[in-house]
Image: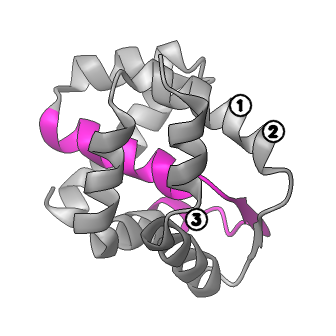
């Protein structure tokens, strides 16, 4: 189980904040930063389901910030959101880690643990991004 204090520290990480601000700016949308305690609850569930450590995710964010930004732009390119929420870089980092280090079956199981509607459709979208980005 993920420690909430570790997640709150990650949400305050300057690299994560810069990634999210860049994605929001490039997508011309707002970044929701209010009620971090509520966002932390949702992100905790997501990180718990990923079975990755906060340290692993934080390290990835720090070392692969451009890749996370590029992934975010590709992921959002068709939906054109009006706003994003703090923590979205964690979601994208988890997706990229799974795409690079795990197989398709493990990624699908993660999406199911997150209770994503139509997980196979999202899996196809993620696999397409993986191919396009050459991950």
Q: Earlier in the sequence, mark 2 or mark 3?
A: 2
Image quadrant in which you'd find residue 109: top left
Q: In this picture, which residue range is highlighted in magenta? A: 75-101
Q: Earlier in the sequence, mark 3 or mark 1?
A: 1
Foreground pick, 57 / 127 = 57
Foreground pick, 75 / 24 = 24
> Residue 38 has which mark?
2
Real-space Cα separation, disc 2 to disc 1, in angstroms: 5 Å
Dot in front, 2 or 3: 2
Q: Are marks 2 and 3 in contact (CB under 8 Å)?
A: no
Q: Position of residue 9 (x, y in %)?
A: 54, 51
Residue 13 vertical position relative to residue 107 in the rendered view, above or below: below
Foreground pick, 28 / 21 = 21
Q: Quadrant of the C terminus?
A: bottom left
Q: Position of residue 123 (x, y in %)?
A: 39, 33
Judging by the rendered image, the residue that carries numbered circle 3 is 78
Q: Residue at x 55, y 71 (%)?
A: 17
Real-space Cα separation, disc 2 to disc 3, in angstroms: 27 Å
Residue 95 appearing in the image: no
> In the displayed image of the protein, which residue is found farthest to the right?
35
Q: Are marks 2 and 1 in contact (CB under 8 Å)?
A: yes
Q: Position of residue 70 (x, y in %)?
A: 36, 72
Q: Residue at x 59, y 78 (%)?
A: 21
Judging by the rendered image, the residue that carries numbered circle 1 is 41
Is 135 displayed left or right of 10 in the figure?
left
Q: Position of residue 104 (x, y in %)?
A: 23, 26
Foreground pick, 90 / 118 = 90
């Amino acid at each position: 189980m993920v420690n909430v204090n570790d997640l709150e520290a990650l949400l305050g990480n300057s690299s994560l904040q810069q990634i999210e601000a860049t994605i929001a700016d490039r997508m011309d949308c707002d970044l929701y930063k209010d009620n971090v305690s509520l966002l932390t609850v949702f992100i905790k569930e997501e990180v718990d389901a990923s079975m990755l450590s906060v340290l692993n995710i934080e390290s990835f964010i720090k070392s692969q910030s451009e890749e996370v930004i590029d992934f975010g732009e590709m992921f959002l390119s068709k939906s054109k959101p009006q706003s994003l929420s703090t923590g979205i870089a964690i979601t994208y980092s988890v997706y990229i880690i799974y795409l690079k280090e795990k197989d398709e079956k493990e990624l699908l199981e993660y999406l199911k643990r997150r209770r994503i509607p139509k997980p196979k459709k999202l899996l196809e979208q993620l696999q397409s991004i993986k191919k396009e980005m050459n991950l």
